Image: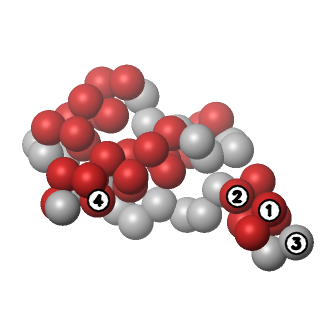
Amino acid sequence: MRQLERMVKVALWCIQDEPSMRPTMNKVLLMLEGTVEIPIPPNPEFFSSQVYS
């Protein structure tokens, strides 16, 4: 379950609308390996607008 949560958090970081908010591939690898902590990602704009429309 922890691995799934880790993957979902990383995925949410990777689909941010603002490219500067997205992690580098190196950072993605470190997050998936568990080497670095994964902060709670903000909700992506397109996802929020689809859910609440």
Left or right: 38, with 42 as reference point? left
Quarter of the image where the C terminus is located: bottom right
Spatial CA span between label 3 and label 4? 26 Å
Disc ID at residue 34: none
Instruction: List the residue tagged with mark 1.
Output: 50
Percent position of residue 34, x then y: 13, 46
- The answer to which of marks 4 and 1 sits earlier in the sequence is 4
Out of 30 and 46, give the one closest to the viewer: 46
Q: Secondary structure at mark 2?
A: helix
Residue 50 is at least partly visible in this image: yes
Which residue is farthest bottom?
52
Q: Secondary structure at mark 1?
A: helix
10 Å crowding of disc 4: few (<14), some (14-19), many (20+):
few
Percent position of residue 40, x then y: 40, 66
Q: What amino acid is labelled 3 in the image? A: Ser
Instruction: List the residue tagged with mark 2.
Output: 47
Q: What amino acid is labelled 1 in the image? A: Gln
Q: What amino acid is labelled 2 in the image? A: Phe
Instruction: List the residue tagged with mark 4.
Output: 5
Q: Are marks 1 and 3 in contact (CB under 8 Å)?
A: yes
Residue at x 19%, y 52% (from the top left corner):
3
Percent position of residue 49, x then y: 81, 64
Spatial CA span between label 2 and label 1? 5 Å
Spatial CA span between label 4 and label 2? 18 Å
Q: Secondary structure at mark 4?
A: helix
